[in-house]
């Protein structure tokens, strides 16, 4: 054999070995990811239901119990060990991305579980006034308008089996909160005072008007008469004997025990282990290790920048007076309150999709197939709620839903509606979340959530308004600036409350000095930040990264930069930690330059 032939065969054989190793590594990772997701759903059946996975409807985890925390710790450690035994060099590029994301997810959750934090909730503080709080979010699901399906007799029977488990969850929550009181780890009293009023309708409402009874009012015609009668009887009995007593028990506990003993201060600094816990939340929500003081300084600079923009809008509109007077004008003048009904508010939101349709194709070549709806937030949970997007079912059985709080249409201010639609709907959360579910990805990545990515994308979507033909009215652009100001203010007040020891009142005053909102709205926002530390920062932190990557791509690619292609790169692989996104986009830029 000639030397030339030998060299050729050597490289051929070596190349085949590399291909075989990569194929073997890819299959191994695929198996690890699939088994992890199956085990995760088995441990979290209510999450499985929310993601449209059948077979879990009659089960529900008590995700604040000692047993759950122990099992979740074991799960995360087991799969981290499996990943550590793998050689990343044996993986194709797409699989390396999967491995990076899964490793980050497992380590993040493990870090939380070691602190008794589970699914973004501190086990010792499991109930609060915000929309994420399980007792109220469970009621939303029970209504039949959320992720829990009520299409078959089995669906109805399955949900009945969850109700005794919900009552057990309440008992565990009360036990944990008592332990939190003992340890000096409680939620802030000012925010907790909102909870009893949220709970009252859930045990005082007459049974046939109760939110848990709504599925009975919508029994499918295909059900037999016998099943309709049986389900009506069983739901009535469960509401009267399980649901209402559980909510009343929780209500009475808050009124008589928890609120009087809850801390009167605002931030985590006054809780046992609060300083270290805040550092954890910064990483949990923002997917990066952040220095609170640097975030605070960034917030101050952004507030100053946006404030200059607001001064410019005031000048453009011809308003005579200072900025606080301009804010008061926007908050109170009748022309900013044109609605007479909830339906009119919803219809105005629906009109925006048609308004921007001609420009969407210029900006996006990748759009979701999932249906989309706009609804008003249910009355019983409005006091602690904000605008919210709920993902569609992966099987297409449930659309994506943008919920907006419309407590009184006559008092609903039109300023900022375009910005809110861009963020929560199109091209914000609906594009990002629905596309993530529709992509061909490992199952855990199809529903993975990283706040800095998702909320960062939502805030970035607001910056696209002018390019999409929106903000033609200066007051709507003021709404854009006000939304940007809100997220910039969050950087200051969240760190102020949890790292610098600000009081609730000082934080409210800071909002009122920089935004055209009422004291009631300012208080609601501050109380949200008080009970969900670090989450409010994720919007600006994520937006900053996406804007940086867009500018980097424009600078390095020049005329070869295509905004549609950039958006594909951001969206096509689903949500991920920001550092991993940075690496991915830089690699794409390098590959474009090499071509």
Image: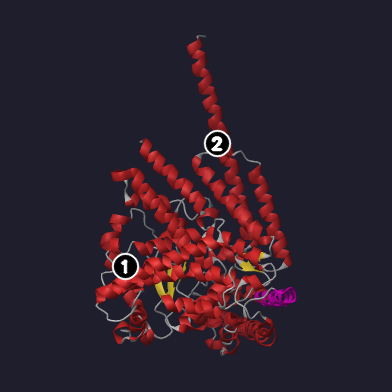
| Magenta span: chief secondary structure | helix
Q: Is residue 566 left or right of residue 495?
A: left
Task: Specify the farthest residue to the top.
Answer: 2
SS of the residue under disc 1: helix
* Vertical relation: 381 (above or below) 119: below
Q: Magenta segment range?
A: 166-184
SS of the residue under disc 2: helix
Colour convention = secondary structure
Q: Position of residue 97 (x, y in %)?
A: 52, 46
Q: Position of residue 68 (x, y in %)?
A: 70, 64
Q: Residue at x 30, y 81 (%)?
A: 321
Location of the C terminus by quadrant is top left
Q: Which mark is residue 23?
A: 2
Q: Is residue 374 left or right of residue 22?
A: left
Few, some or many residues within 10 Å of mark 2 (<14, 14–19, 20+): some
Tell me which corner region of the image, top left, top right, bottom left or bottom right, holds residue 263: bottom right
Q: Residue at x 54, y 24 (%)?
A: 14
Few, some or many residues within 10 Å of mark 1 (<14, 14–19, 20+): some
* Vertical relation: 25 (above or below) 431: above
Which residue lies under the disc numbered 1?
353
């Amino acid at each position: 054999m000639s030397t030339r032939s030998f060299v050729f065969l050597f490289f051929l054989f070596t190349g085949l070995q590399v291909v075989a190793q990569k194929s073997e590594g890819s299959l191994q990772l695929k198996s690890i990811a699939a088994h992890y997701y199956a085990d995760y759903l088995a441990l979290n059946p209510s999450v499985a239901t929310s993601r449209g996975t059948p077979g879990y409807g009659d089960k529900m985890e008590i995700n604040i119990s000692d047993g759950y925390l122990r099992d979740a710790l074991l799960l995360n450690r087991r799969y981290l060990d499996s990943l550590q035994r793998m050689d990343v060099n044996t993986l194709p590029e797409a699989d390396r991305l999967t491995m990076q994301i899964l490793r980050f997810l497992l380590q993040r959750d493990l870090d939380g579980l070691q602190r008794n934090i589970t699914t973004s909730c501190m086990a010792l503080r499991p109930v609060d006034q915000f929309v994420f709080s399980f007792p109220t979010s469970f009621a939303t699901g029970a209504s039949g308008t959320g992720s829990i399906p009520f299409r078959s007799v089995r669906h109805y029977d399955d949900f009945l089996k969850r109700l005794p488990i919900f009552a057990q969850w309440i008992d565990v929550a009360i036990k944990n909160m008592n332990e939190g009181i003992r340890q000096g780890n409680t939620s802030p009293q000012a925010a907790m005072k909102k909870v009893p009023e949220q709970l009252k309708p859930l045990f005082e409402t007459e049974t046939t008007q109760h939110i848990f009874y709504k599925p009975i009012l919508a029994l499918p015609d295909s059900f037999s008469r016998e099943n309709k009668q049986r389900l009506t009887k069983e739901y009535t009995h469960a509401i009267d004997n399980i649901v209402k007593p559980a909510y009343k028990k929780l209500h009475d506990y808050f009124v008589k025990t928890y609120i009087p003993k809850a801390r009167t201060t605002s931030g985590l600094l006054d809780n046992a282990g609060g300083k270290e816990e805040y550092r954890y939340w910064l990483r949990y929500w923002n997917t990066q290790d952040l220095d609170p003081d640097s975030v605070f300084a960034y917030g101050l600079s952004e507030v100053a920048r946006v404030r200059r923009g607001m001064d410019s809008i005031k000048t453009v509109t011809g308003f005579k007076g200072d900025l606080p007077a301009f804010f008061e004008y926007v908050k109170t003048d009748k022309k900013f309150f044109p609605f007479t009904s909830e339906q009119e508010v919803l219809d105005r939101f629906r009109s925006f999709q048609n308004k921007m349709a001609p420009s969407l194709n210029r900006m996006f070549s990748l759009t979701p197939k999932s249906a989309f709806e706009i609804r008003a937030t249910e009355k019983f949970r409005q006091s602690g709620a904000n605008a919210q997007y709920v993902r569609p079912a992966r099987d297409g059985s449930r659309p994506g839903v943008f919920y907006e709080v419309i407590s009184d249409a006559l008092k609903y201010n039109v300023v900022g509606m375009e910005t809110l639609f861009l963020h929560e709907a199109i091209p914000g959360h609906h594009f990002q979340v629905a596309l993530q579910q529709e992509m061909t990805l490992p199952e855990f990545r199809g529903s993975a959530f990283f706040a800095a990515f998702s909320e960062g994308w939502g805030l970035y979507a607001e910056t696209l308004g002018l390019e999409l033909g929106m903000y033609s009215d200066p007051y709507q652009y003021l709404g854009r600036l006000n939304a940007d100001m809100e997220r910039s203010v969050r950087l200051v007040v969240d760190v102020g409350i949890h790292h610098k020891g600000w009081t609730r009142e000082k934080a409210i005053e800071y909002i009122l000095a920089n935004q055209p909102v009422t004291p009631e709205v300012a208080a609601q926002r501050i109380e949200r930040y008080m009970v969900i530390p670090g989450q409010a920062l994720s919007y600006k932190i994520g937006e900053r990264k996406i804007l940086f990557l867009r500018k980097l791509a424009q600078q390095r690619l020049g005329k070869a930069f295509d905004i549609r292609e950039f958006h594909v790169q951001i969206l096509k692989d689903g949500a991920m930690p920001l550092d991993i996104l940075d690496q991915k986009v830089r690699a794409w830029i390098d590959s474009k330059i090499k071509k």
